[in-house]
Image (spheres, rainbow, N blue to C red):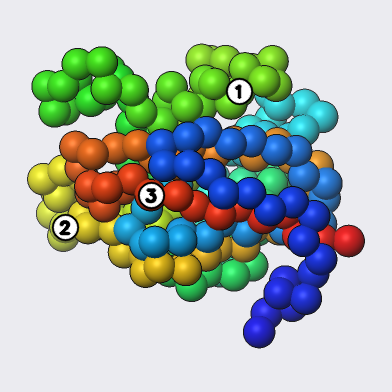
Amino acid sequence: MNEEDALPVIQDEIVAPGAPWSARLQRGRVLRIVDLEGEQGVDFLCYDAADPSERYYAPNTIKKSGTLRLTTGHALYSDRGRPLFTIVADTCGHHDTIAGCCSAPSNAMLYGVEDAPGCRENFLTALAEHGLGWTDIVPNVNFFCAVPIHEEGRLAERTFVDGPSRPGDHVDLRAERDVLAIVSNCPQVNNPAAGGRPSPIRIQILGG
Ligand SMILES: [Zn+2]
């Protein structure tokens, strides 16, 4: 049992397959994302709640953690080199931050399908509730997603390979300051990011 398991539950929601979600978290609180059925990618952005011009920045996160596979102990760094969240628990071990989010334009570009909205469109819906929009979307974290990189730098045929998470896998993210968290429960059916069958997730906010 992790110490997070003893924290009181402040908020507890089921996010439907393919739906967006967002919340502000006070510093010290823990965001728990549970992949209820397994193989479900969860696209994630975060911002400083007081000044959202400071936001998640994958290059700082990758360089500071020294790996492309984020897990327990790694922080999600901002473009100003400060941690927004720290991963304090992770039962999956496969989280990507190079492949970005799916979108209607990328679904047309990659798979030739039209009118197939994705995580970018979910991000826009969630961001609008906080006065943010298109130019506030940056390359994000994809929890429960595996993007293997072969030795010569080649990616998998559909970038993502079969979902690496099992039913009930979760990550716990401790807020290192007051933050805004933006989630898209990935609706993708053209690659394995959502296991080919988008499924619900559970999101909890834990803390005192
Ligand atoms: Zn997606």
* Residue at numbered disc 3: 199
Is 202 drawn above or below residue 198 in the view shown? below
Instruction: Name the amino acid type tagged 1.
Output: Leu
User: Residue 133 in the image: x percent, y percent?
Assistant: 57, 15
Instruction: Name the amino acid type tagged 2.
Output: His
Q: Nearer the viewer, residue 46 or 186?
A: 186
Q: How many angstroms separate mark 3 from mark 1 (CA)?
A: 22 Å
Instruction: Name the amino acid type tagged 3.
Output: Ser
* Residue at numbered disc 1: 127
Q: Residue at x 37, y 69 (%)?
A: 166
Disc 3 beta carbon < 8 A from ligand 1? Answer: no
Is 127 drawn above or below residue 19 in the view shown? above
User: Residue 187 in the image: x percent, y percent?
Assistant: 35, 37
* Residue at numbered disc 2: 150
Using a 10 Å C-alpha cutoff, classify the residue at mark 2 as few (fewer than 14 neighbours), some (14 to 19) or many (20 or more): few
Q: Are marks 1 and 2 in contact (CB under 8 Å)?
A: no
Q: Residue at x 41, y 36 (%)?
A: 18
Say which quarter of the image contains residue 121: top left
